[in-house]
Amino acid sequence: MELLLSGLMTLIEPLKYGFMQRSLMEAVIVGVICAVVGSYLMVQRLALLGDAISHSVLPGLAIAFILGVNIFVGAFIAGLLSTVFINIIRTRSPIKEDAAMGIVYSAFFALGITLITIVQKDNKVDLNHFLFGNILGVSFADVRDTFIIAVIVLIIVAAFYKELLFYTFDKLGAQAAGLPVKKLDFGLMILIGLTIVASLKAVGVVLVLSLLITPAATAYLLVSRLHLMMILGVILAIFSSITGMYLSYFYNLPSGPAIVLVASGLFILVFLFGPKYGVLYPHSV
């Protein structure tokens, strides 16, 4: 009984602090939308697209800071511009989609690093948290903005779930059935962009792809239906976020990387011992 009470007190201790309350709320919200949107990326094998957009938001952040406008707006616009450029290169040249993504995201990322360096030199401010996240520093306004983005993303997914499901598994069939495939393509890119923008404070540009893909990939190894994959991915992402935050608090670890390491650890466990595809599971084929 004493051991149970001691463990309970340990769990409650971080909640005494306002910054931990805000950070945990932010982590849970980000985990939910990353798992939902990441499921589409996982099934469609579009992980590189998530990587491209996540790196491409950096110049938008820097420009928004220079102009004194909301950094979320700048990041979102930059993410959308990167997808437009990727589509232009892909559709109007013989260059394949993966090469187009590599060209665009590396150019945007380099521009972002350059702008951030210039801004930091002239203003004596530290913008490196955009790269690696600073979830412990989120304000109530940040949590509110993230929550609003999450609600928008989840409403869109719920409203167009059937169309996105058909399009995800059979793009040619969806086109033949009369679904606006190009609009769904662009809509999915908007969802990815919104999710990445919402995740910036939590894990930063560099690590956001892991939170987008890893919980969804772990769920993909365990279940076969998209809605089950989303639900399980959300559970895994929330567990990873909360556990990572507690590890960060008690062991003085960087919070974003701690969350990602927990998510990666869960993937490794399922990859090795999962009942369906586990490499070391006795009944795996």
Image (cartoon, helix red, strand yellow):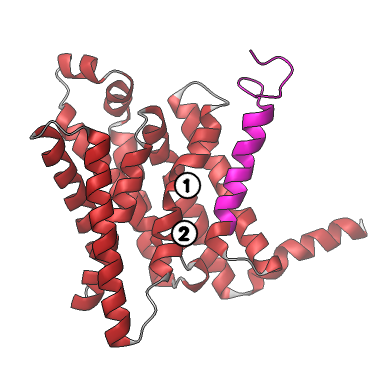
Q: Can you tell which mark lies on residue 56? A: none
Give the left or right position of residue 257, taking residue 184 as reference: right
Q: Give coordinates of residue 79: x percent, y percent.
A: 24, 53
At x 34% / y 34%, what residue is drawn? 46
Q: What separation in Å lies between label 1 and label 2 (alpha carbons)?
A: 9 Å
Where the C terminus falls, by quadrant? top right
Question: Tag 2: Cα neighbours inside 10 Å, few (<14), some, or many (≥20)?
Answer: many
Residue 280 colored in magenta in the image: yes
Of 223 and 92, which appears nearest the observer? 92
Looking at numbered disc 1 in the image, what kind of residue is underneath it? Answer: Ser
Give the left or right position of residue 257, taking residue 130 as reference: right
Q: Give coordinates of residue 101: x percent, y percent.
A: 25, 42
Q: Can you tell which mark lies on residue 210? A: 1
* Residue 70 visible: no
Looking at numbered disc 2 in the image, what kind of residue is underneath it? Answer: Val
Of 232 and 276, which appears nearest the observer? 276
In the image, residue 186 sits, relative to residue 280, either above or below, namely below
Question: Which residue was labeled with disc 2?
Answer: 203
Question: Tag 1: Cα neighbours inside 10 Å, few (<14), some, or many (≥20)?
Answer: many
**Which of the 4 quarters of the picture holds residue 249?**
bottom right
Q: Which portion, as a residue range, is magenta?
A: 258-285
At x 28% / y 53%, what residue is drawn? 106
**Numbered-mark total:** 2
At x 48% / y 48%, what residue is drawn? 211
**Which of the 4 quarters of the picture holds residue 180?**
top left
Give the left or right position of residue 82, taking residue 263 as reference: left
- Which secondary structure, mark 2? helix
Of 58 and 34, which appears nearest the observer? 58
- Which secondary structure, mark 1? helix
Whether residues under marks 1 and 2 lie with C-beta atoms below 8 angstroms apart, the answer is: yes
